[in-house]
Image (cartoon, coloured by chain):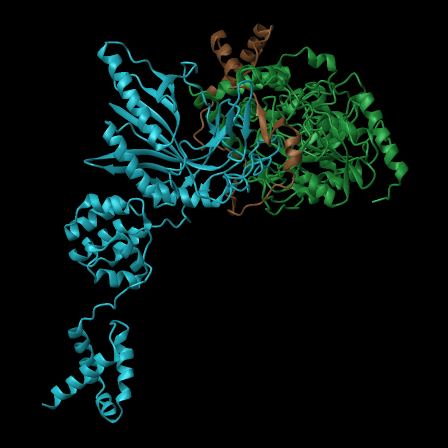
Chain colours: A cyan, B brown, C green
Amino acid sequence: MKIGLEVHVALPTKTKLFCSDSTSYSDEPNTNICPVCMGFPGSKPVLNKETLILSANIATALHCRVIERTSFVRKVYFYPDLPKGYQITQTEGAIGNGGSVAISGKEVRIRRVQIEEDPAKVVRGENYTLLDFNRSGIPLNEIVTEPDICSESELKEFLVELRSILYYQGIDIDREIKTDLNISLAEERVEVKNITGVDSLLKAARYEILRQGSLLEENQPVKRETRAFDEKSGVTVSSREKETEEEYGFIFDTDLTFYDTKWIEVKKPVIPRLVAEKYSKKYGYDEEKLREAIYLNRDNMDMLAYVDDGAAIEKVVNLMQKLRSKPTKEVIRRLLNSDINNLSREQLERWVRGEFDEPEPVNMDEVRREVAELLRSDPSLSKRYKENKNTVNFIIGKVKKKHNVSYNDIVGIVDSILSDNQV
Amino acid sequence: MDRVSFEKIVEACRLPLEDDSEKILSDLNEILEVFDKIDKCNVADEPAFHPVGIPQKLREDIPKTFDNVDKLLENTSTYRFYVVGPKI
Amino acid sequence: MNAHTVMDYKKLVSVAKNVDEKFNAFNAINENLSGGRPISVKDNICVSGLECTASSRVLRGYIPPFDATVVEKLKNKGFSVLGKTNMDEFGFGSFGLNTEKQTKNPFNPEYCAGGSSAGSAIATASIKDHISIAESTGGSISAPAAFCGVVGFTPTYGTVSRFGLIDYANSLDKIGVMSRTSRDIREVFGIIRGGDERDTTSTDREVKDEPKRAVTVVDNLLDLVDGEVKEHFQDLLGKLMNAGFKVNHTKIEGIEYAVPVYYIISMAEASTNLAKYQGFKYGKGAVDYGTDYNTFFKRARASFGAEAKRRIILGTFIRSASVKSRYYEKALRIRANLIKKLKVALKSGYLLSPTMPIKTPRIDEIERLSPAKIYAMDVLTVLPNLAGLPHMSFPYAYPEDMPIGAQIVGDHFDDYSVMSFVDEWEKSFKYKFKYSMG
């Protein structure tokens, strides 16, 4: 079995790919529009700088080479949602090429990451269509894989990995992801076009596996064709499109030019799978649990920074699983000193808000060590203390930053140290 | 260009096949003969997409509203703010 | 300029109507013209509120909700638009005949006005002191300027913003100016030129004024010119030598490819630009939305003219995967090669040639020709256009009372230097006009 995907994700920019209209989805239809994204005669595209930066980062996170000079082509086809009769997209000049995403035991190769514009939103009527051009021109990345996915479980795993990588690039693909699924159990490739959402994608794949499998069992040929997924019934149906492949006639879009990418500062990408692997190896902790905690949760990823030994990781992951919001640094420190495994979720949430119902247990030995060190390093302190007991306030101020100790505790410790020293 | 590919392209262009399509096809083939002259020319230059170098021009990601949306939509048929298009 | 009174504007509108009745110069006339310095604008350039069709039925009823950058700049400098000038549909033509209202030459209405900026040339040739904003892709300013006896300037690609220009071929389209003197062109070019944040390909690069004292004649180009035109051109060269110009001769290998290369690139690009015309969103076309979209599109696109259809079909064919490298990609390489050679030739001065290889033809003569034969007439104008070089056509003789034009070409961004050449020509040569209405 061979599965390849073309995944389309919207980039989190404020404006569209080639014009300055807002990318806001929630507005009334056709309010964020202008001559450019409506494809009016005379309008011209001007590239959004942010889309280049975001795309170079995404391409890098997918281990692609970022091309030095990126360029755009026109893909000509006719559909009511495509205002210019062509889509501005990328082919050879695509921003990212030749990457990969690791899943269990293999790598799924990424052929290309390309920048392109979203068509308008279509509402089908019986005798018309209604079009909302607010969506027209929203910047997308199309991520094209090689047909390296060989089973349903690999497909699932790939989507989990892709989703977590994109999550750390600021994209939540669960919201709206559109995928073209290429799937072949035998020779001929079947393309299921325009599947919305991750769930539908998995359903469509499962349906095709069954459908093609049963055809093969009956010794019937699987036709090379384009199909569509019907969300309601959960089945794929043959599109009435012509069997011959549409001829797009790509040409360089000369309204645009070549764009240099060398100036883009690409941040070191967060690959959650690698982070989980690293912490698991270092501290011998369950990798699967780590993944679950950090794959789609930046707060949890941040909390990993507090881990400095094997005991801490146990507690951190435990915390991650129990917490709804990230506690402050101070509170985490205190939590890690506590027995959180036996806490109720309610009590833990109270603690996270900093509402502790009992004082923090104090490690008196450590306090004693620190006070002794203080007295040793500044001999005048002992003298001043003997003359005026109020000097203890200064000592309290010094150690209280770390320990929750009382006035009387410190007086007792200082007295005991001084009397020990006299002996 | 033969008759079959001609008809295929006319269809792909969403153009109607005209009554005098034989004449059109022969005109097109006469033009293609002119185009075929470049077969003889062999140059190794990099393709010139533009006649002069065009430096890159990038737009900052700052939203700006087009001030004439109503006039834009006056060119179209609309229904409840939607643009009406043909059936799919 | 001179202050116009209310009466003047009414008169000017009636003059425009008169010119239109005689020679079919306009697609739209601004009846409300009431102030500013009048200028006409080719009908493929958007003027807010004025119907804009590029002479295509497919765009009938389209009212642009914005001004092209050139129009905006001109309005800011006190100009107002008198009317939208007739043209070959989308710029597809060299004789002003590929339009529903076929244009006629003001010197003799049985003759061609030239195209595609036909109406701009007619208006300039007929109305006193008139200036018109025209556009050239492969010679659409030079050709009508030569046939109608006006000065037509095409700038370096990118020096004038294309925002608001209805695309023919994006890597070739250039907005330029026609007028009765080089001086007016210099003034208007100074207003409209410059980079534009709404057009990626526009540039703020400095434009030079370094007049040269030498012209180069490309001999193997001149070989393609009709005998009588060649004779007049030799006279022109004689006059220039007498005026102290050095005349060089050279040969450029590969110029025979310029016409096919130009048509391949321009048709490939045009066939994508014309995909947007589908009969809804703009242009009042078909309204039966209940028809399947493919049929709906086909019905709307049936209203393209014959030449537009030819270019869509051929352009789509030469972009298709199986022949793309043979036609389109090869053409782009030859274009690069020709630009290189032209720039070498331009090192020793301007390039000079007749504008058109024939004298102004009769309308019925052209109508008898096949498209391929008509394209061949562009042999002299496509070279500077393909290379994005600034050039200007100016009248230099009037055999049998019809004007003929010559074309002077400069290096990239030498736009003012080209104008300076024509400035000097105008000092010793007086243009003739049959009409000076208004």
Give the vertical position of A56 relative to A131 (above or below).
Answer: below
Q: How many marks?
A: 0
Q: Does the rendering let one see residue A216?
A: yes
Quadrant in the rendering for residue C376: top right
Q: Position of residue A9 (x, y in %)?
A: 40, 36
Q: Position of residue A21 (x, y in %)?
A: 55, 41
Name the side, left or right, on which C72 lies relative to A190.
right
Name the side, left or right, on which C306 lies relative to A152.
right
Name the side, left or right, on which A335 lies relative to A224.
left
Query: Which residue is more in the foreground, C438 or C78?
Result: C78
Give the vertical position of A253 relative to A377 (above or below).
Answer: above
Q: Position of residue C11 (x, y in %)?
A: 88, 32
Give the vertical position of B35 relative to C436 (above or below).
Answer: above
Residue ranking furthest to the bottom: A387
Query: Which residue is more in the foreground, A19 or A219?
Result: A219
Name the side, left or right, on which A181 lies relative to C133.
left
Residue at 64% x, 46% y is: C208
Q: Does the rendering let one see residue A187?
A: no
Residue ranking furthest to the right: C7
- Which quadrant, please, contains the C terminus of chain C? top right
- Which quadrant, please, contains the N terminus of chain C? top right
Q: Position of residue A270 (x, y in %)?
A: 30, 47
Quadrant in the rendering for residue C368: top right
